[in-house]
Every structure is written in structure tokens, then in C-alpha cells.
Amino acid sequence: MSTLVTVVKNSRHLKDFLRLPHVIYRDDQNWVPPVASEVRRTLNVNKNPYFREATLRLFMAYRKRMPVARLAIIINELQQKRFGVRSAFFGYFETMNDEEAARGLFAEAEKYCISKGARLLEGPFSPNHYSELGLQLDFFGAPPSFFQPYNPPYYGELLKTLGFRVSARFWTMKNDQIRDYARQRYGFSRKLHNLNGYSVRSISLTDLGTELERIREVNNDAFDSNWHFLPLSQAEYAFASKYMKLVTRPDLIKIVEHEGQPIAVLHCVLDINPLLKNLNGKVGPIKWVKFMMARRTIKKLIIYTVAIKKAYRHTRVSYLLLEALCEMLQDFDVVETTWLSSENIPAVKAAESLGMRPDKHFAIYEKGIGP
């Protein structure tokens, strides 16, 4: 049975691209539908500042005129120059359990990548290193937390069949009884704030633009040497942070300053996935009111990022961040990290100090292409 692969070039193709996951996961009670308008916004090359330096091409595979697989290809010349590898990223990968369709889809995508000079295809990145990334490797019967990839078990096997290999592994860590653990081990009464020029505070919503710049400054310094990291521009960070108020609160984002200068950030978010599931990919005024009311009941906290400027990594800053986090944990039952790698030993040890243990595992895949 033949498969037709085409580039997404009209509204009908884009609609199929957005709707395909709803077909694949229609019987999966754990899947959380993404908000379609947000996916559209992210993939709009005229609005998303990331695509000022990167190119995007979307592919759809059809069988008997029915969509069966999709893929996005992202090529960023700055990424290639910074890391010296002529690579392309793939993302937004979804497919029926159909090797022929997946093979045809990647064959066309690889032709495009080769024509653009790429010699390595890596992913999933949807669409970049600071977005959702990786394939889930285990715990397929459990619902995903906010910002976690989610996919059927057969995705990884399909990629291996198509010649991909695992190039990076990472995992999340979790403590299901964090309130009691933090209270018993650390207590909540220590006050290390405002000592020797150091101070810790929550972000201010009245001057959010300036606060975002402080956070971006710290992140770009702290993560500069990280795998696949590109410094975020002001426009990129503002774009990515548009809905920050919906996923977190000011008291869940702490900035550490020294002599008035930002040197570290603790950024936590709420696990809003159960609420997103109720939206079913669509938004509206009544749904948002219900969303904001239900958000008050969330008891799972996700440590989104912990960033310390390189010059301050061996100072009292880590203790200040631990104190700030323990204060937050008074209101939560569960705490979870976003992805960690074996190379980030300080982050893993910090998670272990909070009684967190490895939970779900994920992987990035790669394949050499071209001559």
C-alpha cells in the first residue's frame, strides 16, 4: 500500500499536521492534547523569533488520502557554526505503527536535509533545545507531567529500524512525599537571605519585561557550556515566556542577587497537565476561568530550571536556592524535575538531597545522512 509524502504547504495540510496526534492517541487516556493555537504560534516562522536564524519545513505522510505520519525539520546555521557539526533537527514526530509510512516520511525529510548541507539528523527537538525534547523510553502507562514528552512504545523501535541510534539519555527525578521529607530534613525556619550582599526575592509582575531580562542573563551565562545550548535572544525569551503567568506564580520564581546584580534563578512551574487535558486542545473564556480556578488546587511542583552564573557556583548561592525551594515545598505534595543527564552531577546530587529518585527516562536519537 503506497504512502504519499508531501511538504505542508497549505491550510489543509497544516490542519492535518495538528490533528494527527488526536487520531493516534484517541484511545489513550494518559495523553494530554497540546493547545492547537500554541502549536500554531510556535510553528509560525513569521512570529517565532527563533526562525530568524533557523529554517522550518513540515512533512506529512498520507495513505489513501488519510494522514498517517508527520515530521518537522529544523536547520539552524548558528547551531552548526557553534558546535561545528552540520546537523539538522527533527521534531513533532508522530506516526501510526507503520514502518512503511515512517520510512517514506524520513526518506523525504533526509533528502531535504542533505540538499541543505546537513550530514547529521538529530531529535526529537520540538522545535529546539529549550522546548520539549526526546522520546519517552519507559513508564508508558503513566500520564506525562508538564513539559514531558509522551509517545507510544513503538516510536523508538521505528527509529532504530530506520537507522537511528541513541545519542543521549536523560531522565526526570521525583519525590511523592516532598512536604514531609523537606520538613523533616531541612525544616522551613532557616533564613539565609540578605547576608553579605546576597538577597533572594520573588519576581515582580509589575516589571515583568525587566525581570525576564534578568532571568535570561543568568540562564545564558549558566547554561553557556551545556549540550546543544544556544544563547537566547531577548525576543526569543519573551516569545517563549508569553504564557508564563498561566503555568507558574511569582512566588515560584526566585532571583538571587549579589550587590543588586542577578546571579542565580530558581524557576519552578505547576504541573498543569491535568488541566490542559480538560481543555482538549482548545481554549476559550469560560475554559480559561475554570483553568485558573482549578490551578489553585495543584499539588505537584516541577523544578523547571536552576541556573547559577559560573562565577558564583562555589559560593553560598546553592544554600540560598535550597532554602527558597524548601519554603515553596510547604504547599506541595510532589516535586519533580525536568530532564537531567549523568553529566550534570551537581543537579543530580541536589535532587538526591531532596529525596528524589529517578523516574522516567528519555532519549535523543541521531543518524548520519548524505555522503
Image (cartoon, grey):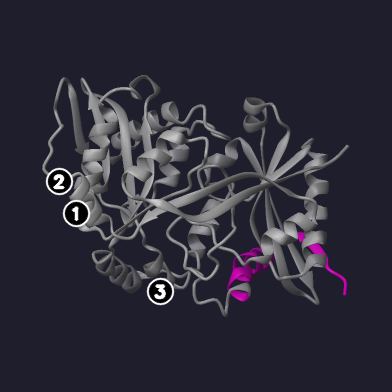
- Disc 1 is placed on an element classified as helix
Question: Which marked residue is nearer to the observer: mark 1 or mark 3?
Answer: 1
Residue on which disc 2 sits: 188
Query: Measured from the top left, where is residue 55 in percent x and y?
Result: 66, 42
Look at the image and say whether residue 16 sits in the magenta stretch.
yes
Viewed as shown, does residue 155 lie left or right of 335?
Answer: right
Asked whether the beta carbons under mark 1 and mark 3 sit within 8 Å of each other, the answer is no
| Distance between mark 2 and mark 1 Cα atoms | 8 Å
Residue on which disc 1 sits: 330
> What's the magenta region?
1-23
Closer to the chain start, of discs 2 and 3, is 2
| Distance between mark 1 and mark 3 Cα atoms | 27 Å
Q: In which quarter of the image is residue 167?
A: top right
Quarter of the image where the N terminus is located = bottom right
Residue on which disc 3 sits: 278
Mark 3: few, some, or many residues within 10 Å (few <14, many ≥20)?
A: some
Query: Measured from the top left, where is residue 56 in percent x and y?
Result: 66, 47
Closer to the chain start, of discs 2 and 1, is 2
- Disc 2 is placed on an element classified as loop
Q: What residue type is labelled 2?
A: Phe
Query: Measured from the top left, where is residue 170 in percent x and y?
Result: 54, 47
Quarter of the image where the C terminus is located = top right
